[in-house]
């Protein structure tokens, strides 16, 4: 369901548990959604290392998510690897009343 400005409803806030990621397909984009200290973060779910679609299952600590496959870490907010410019796409999040909306883009649209 589209909301204004291209934001799409993903789920209810109450459906997310602290530090337990969930995977959603939003407009054909594979998304990992996290709630940490009440903040919602949305990153691309496909690890840039070996393309494992498993980021949602990563361990959360110190504002980062760790890929379960080989331990690469990504900043929850920016998606970037520590000290690097590369990273996962990160998506804007809006919480309106109880509902979580995100705005996805496809990687190829950025070029
Ligand atoms: S696939 Fe994520 S660290 Fe290797």
Image: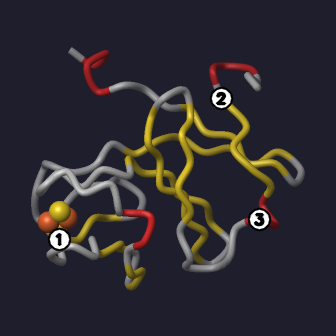
Q: Is residue 95 left or right of residue 49?
A: right
57 up-or-down from 88: above or below? below
For the point 11% across and 65% down, the residue is 83
Crowd rating for badge 1 (residues with CA inside 10 Å; few <14, some 14–19, many 20+): some
Could you tell me which residue is drawn at 35 percent across and 72 percent down? 65
Mark 2 element type: loop
- Locate the C terminus and report the quarter of the image it occupies: top left
| Mark 3 vs 1: CB contact within 8 A | no
Check disc 1 and report the residue beneath it: 72
48 relative to 9, above or below:
below
Dividing the picture into quarters, in which one does residue 67 lie?
A: bottom left
- The span from disc 2 to disc 1 (Cα, nearest Å) is 29 Å
Secondary-structure class at tag 1: loop
Callout 3 crowding tier (Cα within 10 Å): few <14, some 14–19, many ≥20: few
- Whichever of labels 2 and 3 marks the residue nearer the N terminus, that label is 2
Comparing labels 2 and 3, the label whose residue is closer to the camera: 3
Q: Which residue is mark 3?
A: 15
Q: Earlier in the sequence, mark 2 or mark 1?
A: 2
| Whether residue 82 can be seen here | no
Mark number, residue 7: 2
Residue at 18% across / 77% down in the picture? 71
Circle count: 3
Q: Tell me the distance, in whole angstroms, between the alpha carbons under discs 2 and 3.
A: 18 Å
Left or right, residue 84 beside residue 58: left
Q: Position of residue 90 (x, y in %)?
A: 40, 45
SS at mark 3 in the image: helix
Assess mark 1: CB under 8 A from ligand 1? yes
The earlier-in-sequence mark between 3 and 1 is 3
């Amino acid at each position: 369901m589209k909301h204004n400005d291209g934001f799409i409803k993903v789920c209810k806030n109450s459906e997310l548990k602290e530090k337990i990621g969930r995977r959603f397909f939003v407009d054909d984009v594979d998304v990992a959604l996290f709630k940490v200290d009440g903040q919602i973060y949305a990153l691309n779910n496909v690890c840039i290392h070996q393309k494992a679609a498993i980021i949602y299952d990563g361990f959360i600590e110190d504002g980062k998510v760790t890929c379960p496959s080989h331990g690469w870490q990504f900043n929850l907010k920016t998606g970037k690897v520590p000290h690097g410019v590369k990273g996962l796409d990160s998506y804007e999040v809006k919480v309106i009343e109880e509902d979580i909306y995100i705005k996805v883009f496809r990687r190829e649209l950025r070029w």
